[in-house]
Image (cartoon, rainbow, N blue to C red):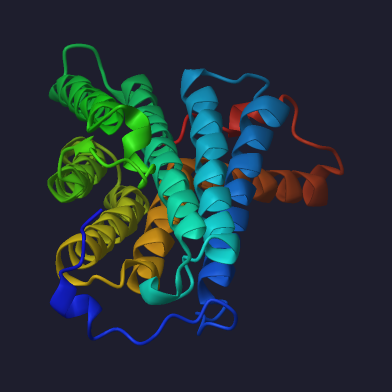
Amino acid sequence: MREPPSEVVATWPAPNYTDPVTRGPELVIVELVFLFLGTLCLVLRIYVRAGIMGRMEADDWLMVGAAIFGAGVTTCVLLAFLRYGWNIHIWDLTFDKMVAGRQVSFAVQGLFLLATTLAKVSILVSYLRLAPLNSGFRRATFAALAFVIIINVAFFINLFVQCVPVSSYWDLTRTERDCNSEDHHLLANAALTAVADFIVWVVPLPAIYSAKIPRQQRLALIALFSFGVVVVVAACLRAYWIHYVVQVTYDVTWWGVYLWMWTAVEVQLGIICGCVPWLRSLVKFWRTTAWTDSTTGAAPPGGRRYLETPRC
C-alpha cells in the first residue's frame, strides 16, 4: 500500500466518519448481474453434461471449481464495498476499515488467481478432446496449459511471500513491515493474465480455419470461439485500473471500485465463455427434440446423440 506524501494529505478535506460521501449501487448491480449470468451458464452446462449426456468430465469439474472461487471473489468485493469502505474516499476511511479492507484485498487476489486459472485450464482441457494426436493444435494447447499454470502458480506463491510475515500485508500497526512493492506484482499479473486470455482465445482458431468443413459452419465456429475476446477486453480494463489505483491516485478506495468491478466481471466472463459452447449444444438439442415431437409425437431416442462435444 502506497503511503501518500504529506503534501497530498494536506489537500484532503477533514475526515467524515459519520456520514461520508458514498458511491452509488452500480458496483453491486454489475457484480450480482454477472454472478447470476455466470452461475446460470454453469448450471445449464451441468444440465447438458450430467442430465442429458450422462457424464461429467475433468473440464466440467474444473469449471465448477472456477465458479466456486469466482463466487468467492464477488462475495468478498461486495462485503468490502458495503462494509469496509471500498465505496468512500480514503480520507473518510477509519483505521479498522482500512485493515479489514486490506484483508479482503488479499483474499480477493488469491481467489481471483484460483478462479481464473481453473477456468482457463478447463477450456484448454476441453480443447484436448478436439485436438488430433500429434497435431499442432494439440501441442499448442499443451504449451498454453503450461504457460497458464506456471505463471499463476508463481503469482500465487508471490502473494504469500511479498510480505514477511504475511500478516504485514494488512497489519498496518507494525512499525517494521517487510513488504515488497505490490504495484509491479499486480501489474505483471494483470498483463500476463491478459496475455493468457488472448492465448486461450486464439489457440483453436488456426485449426478451425483450416478444418475441412462447410464455410458457413467454419465462420459460425470462429464467431463462437471469438466470444473469448470479451474476456481479453475485461483483462485489459482491469490492467488499466490496477495501474491507475496503484500508480496514479492515492484515493484508492474511491477509484478502486472500478478495479474490483472489472476483477469480478473478468472472472465471470471467463466462466461464461467456457460454458457458451455447451449452451449452443443445448439449443440444438431443444430444436431437435421440438422437431421430433412435432413430427412423430415422441422424444428422440438416446437424446445424448444430438449433443456432440462442442466444436468450440
- At 51% from the left and 36% from the top, the residue drawn is 69
Residue extending furthest toward the front: 175
Q: Position of residue 280 (x, y in %)?
A: 52, 47
All told, the count of numbered labels is: 0
Q: Position of residue 5 (x, y in %)?
A: 15, 69
Q: Quadrant of residue 306?
A: top right
In this view, the residue in front, 10 or 225, is 10
Residue extending furthest toward the top: 133
Q: Position of residue 192 (x, y in %)?
A: 16, 42
Q: Position of residue 284 (x, y in %)?
A: 59, 46
Please state if 250 lies on the left or on the right of 44 as rendered: left
Visible residue check, residue 223 = yes
Please state if 107 lies on the left or on the right of 292 as rendered: left
- At 25% from the left and 53% from the top, the residue drawn is 1
In this view, the residue in front, 156 or 106, is 106
Please state if 308 lies on the left or on the right of 266 as rendered: right
Q: Is residue 292 above or below residue 266?
A: above
Quadrant of the image for the C terminus? top left
In this view, the residue in front, 210 or 198, is 198
Visible residue check, residue 312 = no
Q: Is residue 260 above or below residue 305?
A: below
Please state if 57 lies on the left or on the right of 171 as rendered: right
- At 30% from the left and 29% from the top, the residue drawn is 156
- At 61% from the left and 47% from the top, the residue drawn is 39
